[in-house]
């Protein structure tokens, strides 16, 4: 293989002209002959037994050239890319410009990563909210834990109230005719949860156990069954029983029952620490997001549309994988939502554009700063992957596709780039506002960033 020319074109397009000589081409033609001769019929010879000279005389000297070219050009193209130091971001257009007994020449045209510039990425000014745990957040979490630990008890000495679980029989009628799917028996309905048509649950409140009554409602205009959309309906109902969730007392016994702690105070401290950690992670992610936005504004360069299209394709594929984990697929999703894959790509376009810009900017910063990744760092990354997947490290390495180690190195370089930007930023810490304080000005103190370095760049790009 010989790289004849490497030409830069407009709009991040590049052209390579590559030649493959006789020393590689002739053995490939010989191999193509041996692979095809068994299928060739020549009059006067048994099938597959005709000499090559006879076959070429009948079908032409170049009868096996196409197979030989197809076998050789992919590897020749990859070698030419390595020699030229180029990284395509799309599939190349291949044109065979010359072929004869001595070899062939081809032209490969493709898109490469654009040439971009990023300036003033150090010392970016940004704000970071200082996370605190509020009384309302603590109370909400304790209430959630109490509800989880609560038990359902029968209520028989009063009428139905909001929050009760009412066991009901019902049958729905529209225009005096029972409709499909409108009947149920011993159905548990949490009053006030909004499970049924608007107005339904409110009419059960105040009813006594054993009482039979009508519930009058109107189906929403956007109801999924078009024959019922916007229509009035009557449900014949009977209240069979009532249950209410009894919450445990908030004391040391409660703490012992639901956790490894012996006292309520210990449980509260643990809850507070976990809420604070979650909020700090979110604040750090928000800071990183703001810094990345600032970097994008300082980036200059034309982004090839194909890179955005590729990212949209990846996002559609990722969405499909998530659907599969729920027992669904993209085709069913598109039918249900009356949409197409092109609609989905269009909805991802803005996010994909941002993610591509973020990646390019951070790669450029890593290049400008000469950031490198040690072998030990790659090993640590792989070990973490193996732990996350529940796999043996050696087995994971066996399953890794070619070039994955290089991808990991690039990933770690990019993360180092965002760490560098964050650590050099001039961050103004802002007190978190409560709902009551939203309109009040926040107090500020300026200091260097102390954000955690565990936040992933993908969160910043979201």
Image (cartoon, rainbow, N blue to C red):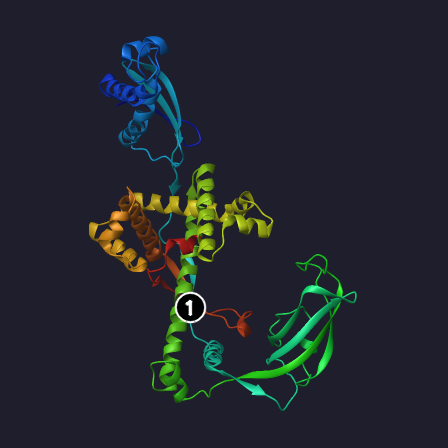
Q: Residue furthest bottom?
A: 157
Q: Residue 160: in sight, yes or no?
A: yes
**Where residue 360 appears, x then y in whole percent?**
38, 43
Dot 1 surroundings within 10 Å: few (below 14), some, or many (20 or more)?
Answer: some
**Where residue 165 appears, x then y in whole percent?**
59, 79
Residue located at (61% from left, 79% from top): 167
In the picture provided, is 441 more to the left or to the right than 274?
right
Q: Is residue 215 above or below residue 413?
A: below
**Where residue 15 appears, x then y in whole percent?**
37, 26
Q: Report the number of numbered marks.
A: 1
Q: Is residue 67 above or below residue 262?
A: above
Q: Quadrant of the N terminus?
A: top left
Residue in the foreground of this view, choosing between 105 and 349: 105
- Which residue has dot 1 on it? 279
Q: Is residue 158 above or below residue 95?
A: below
Residue located at (28% from left, 16% from top): 49
Figure quadrant of residue 231: bottom right
In the picture provided, is 71 more to the left or to the right than 394?
right
Q: Quadrant of the C terminus?
A: bottom left
Figure quadrant of residue 340: top right
Residue in the foreground of this view, choosing between 428 and 10: 10
**Where residue 228 appears, x then y in whole percent?**
72, 61
Give SS at disc 1.
helix
Q: Residue 291: in sight, yes or no?
A: no
Residue in the foreground of this view, choosing between 44 and 410: 44
Q: Is residue 53 above or below residue 105?
A: above
Residue located at (61% from left, 89% from top): 156
Figure quadrant of residue 111: top left
């Amino acid at each position: 293989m010989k790289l004849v020319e490497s030409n830069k074109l407009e709009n991040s397009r590049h052209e390579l002209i590559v030649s493959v000589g006789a020393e590689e081409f002739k053995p490939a033609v010989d191999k193509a002959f041996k692979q095809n001769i068994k299928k060739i019929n020549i009059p006067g010879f048994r099938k597959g037994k005709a000499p090559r000279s006879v076959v070429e005389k009948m079908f032409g000297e170049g009868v096996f050239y196409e197979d030989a070219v197809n076998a050789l050009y992919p590897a020749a193209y990859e070698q030419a890319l390595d020699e030229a130091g180029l990284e395509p971001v799309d599939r190349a257009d291949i044109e065979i410009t010359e072929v004869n007994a001595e070899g062939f020449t081809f032209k490969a045209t493709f898109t490469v990563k654009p040439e971009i510039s990023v300036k003033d990425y150090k010392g970016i000014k940004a704000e970071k909210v200082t996370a605190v745990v509020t009384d309302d957040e603590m109370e909400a979490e304790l209430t959630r834990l109490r509800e989880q630990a609560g038990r359902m008890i029968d209520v028989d000495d009063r009428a139905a109230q909001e929050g009760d679980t009412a066991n009901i029989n019902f049958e729905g009628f529209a225009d005096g005719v029972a409709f499909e799917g409108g009947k149920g028996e011993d159905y548990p309905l949490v009053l006030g949860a909004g499970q049924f048509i608007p107005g339904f649950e409110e009419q059960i409140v105040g009813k006594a156990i054993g009482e039979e009554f009508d519930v009058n409602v109107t189906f929403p205009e956007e109801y999924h069954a078009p024959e019922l959309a916007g229509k009035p309906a009557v449900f014949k109902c009977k209240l069979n029983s009532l249950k209410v969730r009894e919450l445990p007392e908030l004391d040391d016994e409660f703490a012992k029952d639901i956790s490894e702690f012996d006292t309520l105070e210990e449980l509260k401290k643990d809850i507070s620490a976990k809420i604070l950690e979650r909020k700090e992670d979110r604040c750090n992610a928000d800071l990183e997001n703001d810094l990345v936005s600032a970097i994008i504004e300082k980036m200059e360069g034309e982004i090839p549309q194909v890179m955005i299209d590729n990212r949209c394709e990846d996002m559609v594929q990722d969405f499909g994988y998530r659907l599969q984990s729920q027992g669904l697929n993209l085709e069913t999703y598109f039918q249900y939502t009356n949409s197409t894959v092109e609609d989905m790509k269009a909805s991802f376009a803005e996010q994909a554009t941002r993610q591509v810009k973020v990646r390019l900017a951070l790669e450029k910063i890593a290049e400008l700063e000469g950031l490198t990744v040690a072998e030990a760092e790659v090993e640590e990354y792989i070990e973490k992957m193996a732990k996350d997947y529940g796999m043996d490290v050696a087995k994971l390495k066996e399953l890794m596709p070619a070039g994955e180690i290089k991808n990991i190195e690039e990933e770690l370089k990019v993360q180092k780039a965002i760490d560098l930007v964050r650590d050099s930023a001039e961050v103004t810490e802002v007190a978190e506002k409560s709902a009551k304080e939203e309109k009040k000005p926040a107090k500020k103190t300026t200091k260097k960033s102390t954000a955690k370095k565990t936040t992933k760049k993908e969160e910043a790009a979201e």
